Image (cartoon, coloured by chain):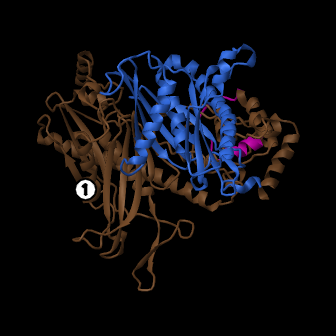
């Protein structure tokens, strides 16, 4: 029963995660996030002067450019750009640098399912690497529904039938032990930033996805924070 | 984006003077000699036909795809090759998305001339049904990081990707003998392209009215240079393409000298590409042999073939792969296997031995006190159980080993059978229980 999935994972298992930062020399921040064979490289250029015409000049604006692995840029890529832009806007502190534009450029290096969550994780890591002020991290995961109706986490491309891409906020208080968090933070921890679904699924299954996704996201965020923290002693030498 | 948005990066006057003065004394800013290339590293992705080339700070990714199309009317029995270059905005703050700029078009044309018009790739073997369907090969080059000399790096990426690309085999069948049946890769092994020769581009930069020339300029030297010339040559000494578009006038004798130097460098780079491709092909063959569905975690990670002479340069990135299995296995339902960390610095020449499974078949290495293993190398080499459900005992053993091996010094790399050394170190570091575990492991996998 547990070996139903093609690559031998059980329904609650994610593919191996890997995150590396500071890969590019010209970009202000860069990160490469891989979940199994889905790999996305994100580059960030920090606040540039000026915003686009329709934007509010009292806030910073985020510009997202999505580069597919092959082929021309079409509607799918534009949709990803819009979703990513809205997600990242909600985690960045937009009032710190008003009337500026931060560019996030994503390059798909490999696509084997769960591409959007991988991209969101990569861009969040790249923003951290660039030092853009953020309210909290955003952790994304993809939950899918098999034909039999059972829930799987992190589906590969062949497993993708009906899927929900979910992005949860990850404030620092969520990793501090329970005693020191104030009650005002509590409702926030149960929030969700973005949810994009493809395919039809029953409502109860969708709520199941949310629960499973949140639980899995706490694991991903642990990994994320660990990989961010262990860089700190090295950063001092890199600054020179 | 309009002009006010694009950040124009300009070299400062001080830097410009410094570079020029240093060149007068035959010195380059990064310590190279005038005719030295930066360290070159060629890596391949999991799929056939995807390559990542790093030339110093310049980073280019190449990806080859193919499709069946109708041939051109004047060449009914030849396939087509098209090269698309993307100057990604992540490479340089001055690159903008949308229409390719001048240098992007120039780069695409130089590589196109070198590859297609010199007939490096055999087009006639790409014909399936003459006049009806042929293979169209498309090479996408993504410039990820502009550290200077994009033409050379992109060219190498294209060559590496084309050398490892395989197209599906298709036969002509059906009732009327005109239908093309494409076989999936599981049924019939895909076929590599026929490449006659490898045209390698070598770029020169001229300074101070053509008197000083250097090879492989960095982006700062490119901002200072007076002129540039790219010579695409192959190992046989044929000149496939020469591009000198404007810039300072240069004497004929200097041009001839450049061509001579280029042919030597081309031979050098060709041998590097070939050995990288050979290593990838061996690893691919190994991978194809072991097709057990539930046992091996081969699919994680890239088959890396680091080619640089200077190892320090490569390790700018810190890669973190955290091994979280213990926590994950104790947390009930959610199993996050394979969230793994290792430190990057020691991960230099990781070849296909990444798989770290005892029966991949490297030389058996019984060396109870190996001086030259880095603990984190071992950590990284065992870090790839992939999407398997590893049993907890294995994890405990490995975790125990890791902590015990933390004293081992780093040094040169180990052979391609790291796990053999690990299992050999087992008896020293852990209790006798671990020997049984080592045996147990094999039993489980045989199931």
For label 1, the residue is B238
**Is B412 included in the stretch rendered in magenta?**
yes
Q: Which residues are magenta?
A: B407-424
Q: In the figure, is residue B408 to the left or right of A196?
A: right
**Is A26 included in the stretch rendered in magenta?**
no
For the residue pair A168 and B131, the one nearer the viewer reads as A168
Is residue A37 depicted above or below A123 in this figure? Answer: below
Give the quarter of the image for residue B289: bottom right
Q: In the figure, is residue B242 to the left or right of A49?
A: left
| Image coords of residue A166 (percent x, y) | 59, 38
What residue is shown at x 34% (from left), y 36% (from top)? B36
Instruction: Tell me if mark 1 has few (under 14), some (14-19) or many (20+) residues whose alpha carbon lies within 10 angstroms of its own.
Output: few
- From the rendered image, report the letter of the chain displayed in blue: A
For the residue pair B96 and B446, the one nearer the viewer reads as B96
What residue is shown at x 47% (from left), y 27% (from top)? A89
Q: In the figure, is residue A14 to the left or right of B73?
A: right
Q: Among all residues in the image, which is located at the extreme front?
A: A203
Give the quarter of the image for residue A222: top right
For the residue pair B281 and B189, the one nearer the viewer reads as B189
Is residue B29 depicted above or below B103 in this figure? Answer: above
- From the rendered image, report the letter of the chain displayed in brown: B
């Amino acid at each position: 029963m547990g070996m139903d999935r093609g690559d031998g994972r059980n329904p609650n298992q994610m593919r191996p995660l890997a995150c590396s930062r500071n890969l590019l020399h010209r970009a202000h921040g860069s990160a490469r996030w891989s979940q199994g064979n889905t790999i996305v490289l994100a580059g960030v250029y920090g606040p540039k002067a000026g915003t686009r015409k329709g934007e509010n000049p009292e806030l910073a604006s985020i510009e997202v450019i999505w580069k597919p692995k092959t082929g021309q840029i079409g509607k799918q890529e534009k949709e990803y750009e819009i979703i990513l832009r809205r997600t990242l806007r909600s985690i960045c502190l937009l009032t710190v640098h008003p009337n500026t534009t931060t560019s996030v450029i994503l390059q798909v290096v490999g696509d084997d399912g769960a591409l959007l969550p991988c991209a969101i994780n990569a861009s969040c890591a790249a923003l951290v690497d660039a030092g853009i002020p953020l309210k909290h991290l955003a952790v994304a995961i993809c939950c899918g529904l098999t034909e039999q109706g059972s829930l799987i986490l992190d589906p590969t491309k062949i497993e993708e039938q009906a899927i929900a891409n979910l992005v949860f906020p990850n404030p620092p208080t969520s990793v501090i032990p329970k005693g020191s968090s104030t009650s005002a933070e509590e409702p926030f921890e149960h929030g969700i930033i973005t949810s994009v679904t493809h395919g039809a699924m029953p409502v109860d299954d969708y709520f199941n996805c949310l629960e499973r996704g949140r639980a899995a996201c706490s694991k991903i965020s642990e990994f994320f924070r660990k990989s961010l923290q262990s860089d700190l002693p090295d950063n001092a030498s890199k600054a020179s | 984006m309009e002009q006010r948005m694009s950040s124009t990066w300009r070299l400062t006057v001080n830097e410009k003077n410094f570079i020029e003065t240093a060149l007068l004394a035959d010195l380059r800013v990064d310590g190279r000699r005038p005719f030295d290339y930066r360290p070159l590293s060629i890596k391949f992705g999991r799929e056939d036909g995807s390559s990542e080339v790093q030339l110093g700070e310049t980073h280019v990714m190449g990806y080859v795809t193919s499709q069946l199309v109708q041939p051109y009317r004047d060449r009914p029995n030849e396939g087509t090759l098209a090269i698309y270059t993307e100057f990604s905005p992540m490479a340089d703050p001055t690159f903008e998305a949308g229409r390719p700029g001048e240098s992007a078009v120039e780069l695409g044309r130089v590589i196109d001339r070198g590859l297609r018009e010199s007939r490096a790739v055999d087009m006639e073997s790409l014909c399936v049904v003459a006049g009806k369907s042929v293979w169209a090969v498309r090479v996408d080059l993504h410039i990820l990081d502009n550290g200077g000399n994009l033409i050379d790096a992109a060219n190498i990426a294209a060559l590496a990707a084309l050398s490892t690309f395989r197209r599906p085999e298709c036969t002509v069948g059906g009732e009327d003998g005109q239908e093309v049946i494409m076989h999936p890769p599981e049924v019939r092994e895909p076929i590599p392209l026929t490449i006659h020769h490898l045209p390698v581009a070598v770029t020169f930069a001229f300074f101070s009215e053509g008197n000083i020339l250097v090879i492989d300029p960095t982006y700062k030297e490119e901002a200072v240079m007076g002129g540039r010339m790219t010579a695409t040559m192959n190992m046989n000494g044929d000149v496939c393409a020469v591009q000198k578009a404007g810039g300072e006038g240069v004497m004929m004798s200097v041009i001839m000298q450049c061509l001579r130097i280029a042919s030597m460098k081309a031979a050098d780079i060709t041998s590097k590409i070939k050995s990288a491709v050979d290593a990838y092909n061996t690893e691919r063959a190994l991978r194809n042999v072991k097709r057990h569905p539930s046992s091996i975690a081969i699919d994680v990670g890239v088959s890396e073939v680091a080619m640089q002479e200077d190892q320090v340069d490569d390790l700018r990135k810190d890669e973190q792969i955290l091994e979280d299995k213990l926590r994950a296995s104790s947390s009930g339902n959610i199993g996050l296997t394979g969230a793994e960390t290792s430190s990057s610095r020691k991960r230099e020449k990781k070849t296909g031995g990444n798989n770290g499974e005892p029966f991949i078949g490297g030389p058996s290495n019984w060396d109870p006190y190996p001086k030259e293993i880095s603990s984190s190398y071992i950590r990284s080499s065992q870090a790839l159980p992939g999407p398997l459900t590893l049993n907890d005992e294995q994890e405990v053993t490995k975790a125990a080993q890791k902590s015990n091996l933390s004293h081992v010094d780093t040094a040169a790399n180990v052979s391609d059978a790291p796990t053999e050394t690990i299992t050999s170190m087992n008896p020293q570091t852990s209790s006798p229980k671990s020997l049984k575990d080592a045996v147990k492991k094999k039993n489980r996998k045989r199931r």
